[in-house]
Amino acid sequence: MRRITARSRRRALVRRHHLAGDAAGPEDVTRALVALHATDPASVYLSVLARSAGTTLAEVSDAMYERRSLVRWMGMRRTLFVVARDDVPMIQAAVTASVAATLRRRLISRMVRNGTEPPAPNEPDALGVWIRDLEADVEDALVGRGAATGSELASDVPSLRTLIPARTASETPQRLTTSVLTLMGADGRLVRSTPTGPWTSRQHLWEPATAWWPHGLPPVDEADAQGDLARRWLARFGPATAEDLQWWTGWTKTTTARVLQGLPIEEVDLHGQPGIALCDPGEDPDDPDDTDPPPPTAALLPALDPTPMGWKHRDWFLGIDPRGIFDRAGNIGPTLWWDGEIIGSWAVAPSGEIRTVIVAERGEDARTAVDDAAARLHARLDGAAVTPAARTPLEQSL
């Protein structure tokens, strides 16, 4: 059985994920990582800037909203990502269609259980038809406007303001607007478009999917899409464990096993634990006995960056106590990287100053490289203050 060391995995991570800043642009970065986490909009920009030294904030925005080569799309684990436009049909068939079905069942169940104000049908089948009619009205209104906020659509379609009251003390009253628009996005009928504020804004316009795919989203067979997605992930994140793939996709253990059976994979020894790798991934991890390794490099990755969020098991690239860089929900905050290893954290102060803290000392070269990387990023942010959605102990301490 081929043995893969943690050191060789870290070297492969640096090269494949462009932690030396050598990617050509936003599209190149996205292809290298399969998808960029977009729950926090700022993370998309910062993830690209960390990997493409020549890219500006404006060029990231241009890729998403002018060239439209990149799209914000709900995907793995019911999480928002930015993905290549050409990959949307694959993502939709492999994971998002199933997410949409789950969202629809949960919405109907909650509306039946809690009731609504004003009353909607209280029987699941009839309520399902009522929601479908509501979605059709929303789509018609959006086509008429071209692009709109949720508030504007609720003004056009008053039923979106239907309230689901709280039934227990732990629940919060909720109007249908967000749930229905999120559901329609997961069904491939709406697209999250330009932000209503600066590049860090979490509010955006909605557009009909026909504005991006005039002839409709191309259909893809589910099994083929799942195989393609798993192969792409293994080529960029493998060797790894089957549990890593299951966690990243949000699939069940049964689905993950079925998909892997259709791929050319081999079992490997991942520094003492069983793992899997593509038999011909195109670029194997570096030889652990390589006598001419690439020079170490420093990188400042943002909260929810796709590299550390790409695996469930992360001990092999954690040089510090994870409690300092993860929140209680398991989301990672901003991280400092040196030679493929997390050695600290960073934050943007209200003044725009970038502050860093190195917890795992790796020598003067590492400290100098981190300071240089922070200075370069500060110049590219043009004074913007960035507060991550995932607040972690080390980031907050800065």
Image (cartoon, grey):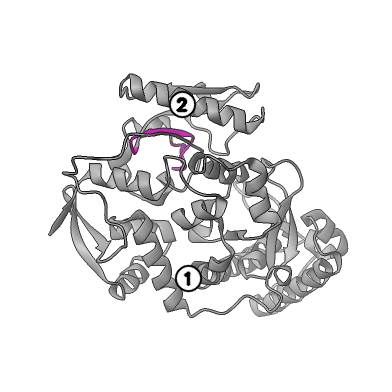
Q: Earlier in the sequence, mark 1 or mark 2?
A: 1
Q: Position of residue 314 (x, y in %)?
A: 33, 44
Q: Position of residue 248 (x, y in %)?
A: 41, 56
Question: Which residue is under mark 1?
Answer: 94
Query: Alpha-carbon neighbours of circle 2 within 10 Å: few (<14), some, or many (≥20)?
Result: many
Query: Alpha-carbon neighbours of circle 1 within 10 Å: few (<14), some, or many (≥20)?
Result: many
Which residue is situated farthest in the top direction here? Answer: 364
Q: Position of residue 71 (x, y in %)?
A: 62, 59
Quadrant into which the N terminus falls: bottom left
> SS class of the residue under badge 2?
helix
> SS class of the residue under badge 1?
helix
Q: Position of residue 338 (x, y in %)?
A: 36, 32
Residue 181 sits in quarter? bottom right
Q: Residue at x 41, y 48 (%)?
A: 17
Q: Residue at x 66, y 30 (%)?
A: 382
- Please determine whether, in this image, residue 262 is positioned above or below residue 317: below
For badge 1, the amino acid type reads Ala
Q: Residue at x 24, y 41 (%)?
A: 7
Q: Residue at x 51, y 73 (%)?
A: 93
Identify which residue, 291 or 201, lies in the foreground: 291
Can residue 335 be seen? yes
Question: Which residue is under mark 2?
Answer: 394
Q: Is residue 320 left or right of residue 121?
A: left
Query: Disc 1 and disc 2: Cα gap in Å?
Result: 36 Å
- Please determine whether, in this image, residue 306 is positioned above or below residue 161: above
Identify which residue, 184 or 297, lies in the foreground: 297
The magenta region covers 326-340
Q: Which mark is residue 112?
A: none
State yes or no: discs 1 and 2 in contact (Cβ < 8 Å): no
**Magenta region's main secondary structure?**
loop
